[in-house]
């Protein structure tokens, strides 16, 4: 059976259902209408395949660009240099601040005036919480909760507070006061130099 006769048979079945014509397939095949319909169907199939493949190709193309793909050698150094330029940028302010206090031996967390007597301040970037239980007595602790490793949120009412599961710690020694945490916050050595809290 040739392609023309198979297509004519298929067109006859589909054509009678779609067009409501019972004997139109043979007449269209004789007129050359079958070839036009087959050409249209081929084009429609190609368009459908191209349309379905385009998002896949676009998705593959997008991930190759994001991941580096074949040009990963040239993209990876560019990508690596961007984060490393970001890291030195964040290190540069830190290194410029310690450079002025480097002879003293630590990085500056912030002004001592930010830490109230009977309270404290969380230095989020350094992951350190500094308290001042009594005037002039500064204590430093890790700002990472010992319960599940979440960041400490604040110092309120004379207690260091983790907002995630409501653990409270003493501003004097970092010991747990209430909540699920069972271990004290690790101590961090801090001191005041030139009006700033410095991590020793």
Image (cartoon, grey):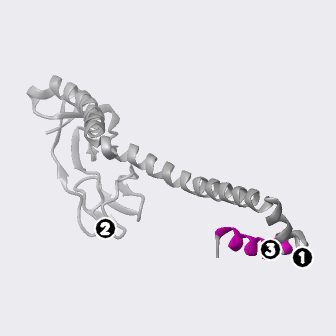
Rendered view: 112 above or below 147: above
User: Which range of residues does the magenta coloring cover?
Assistant: 3-16
Q: Is residue 4 magenta?
A: yes
> Would you name the residue on which mark 3 appears?
12
- Give the mark nearest the N terminus, 2 or 1: 1
- Which residue occupies 21% across, 25% down? 96
Residue 150, quarter of picture: bottom left
Name the foreground residue: 104 vs 77: 77
Q: Say what secondary structure mark 3 lies in.
A: helix
Quarter that holds the N terminus: bottom right
Look at the image and tell me whether residue 118 can be seen.
no
- Which residue occupies 77% across, 70% down? 11
Name the foreground residue: 136 vs 110: 110
Asked whether the residues under the numbered discs 2 and 3 touch, taking CB atoms below 8 Å apart as contact, a structural biologist would say no
> Would you name the residue on which mark 2 appears?
181
> Would you name the residue on which mark 1 appears?
22
> What percent of the width, then of the height, locates residue 71?
31, 40
Rendered view: 7 above or below 152: below
Left or right: 61 as drawn, with respect to 36? left
């Amino acid at each position: 059976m040739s392609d023309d006769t198979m297509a004519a048979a298929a067109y006859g079945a589909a054509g009678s259902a779609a067009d409501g014509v019972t004997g139109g397939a043979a007449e269209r095949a004789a007129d050359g209408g079958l070839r036009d319909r087959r050409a249209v169907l081929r084009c429609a199939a190609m368009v459908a395949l191209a349309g379905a493949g385009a998002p896949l190709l676009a998705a593959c193309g997008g991930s190759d660009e994001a991941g580096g793909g074949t040009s990963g050698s040239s993209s990876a150094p560019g990508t690596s240099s961007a984060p490393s330029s970001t890291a030195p940028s964040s290190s540069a302010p830190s290194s410029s601040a310690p450079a002025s206090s480097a002879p003293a031996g630590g990085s500056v967390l912030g002004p001592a005036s930010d830490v109230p007597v009977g309270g404290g301040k969380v230095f989020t970037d350094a992951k350190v919480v500094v308290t001042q239980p009594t005037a002039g007595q500064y204590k430093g602790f890790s700002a990472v909760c010992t319960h599940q490793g979440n960041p400490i949120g604040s110092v309120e009412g004379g207690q260091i507070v983790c907002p995630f599961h409501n653990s409270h710690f003493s501003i004097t020694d970092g010991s747990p006061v209430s909540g699920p945490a069972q271990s004290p916050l690790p101590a961090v050595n801090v001191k005041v130099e030139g009006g700033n809290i410095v991590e020793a």
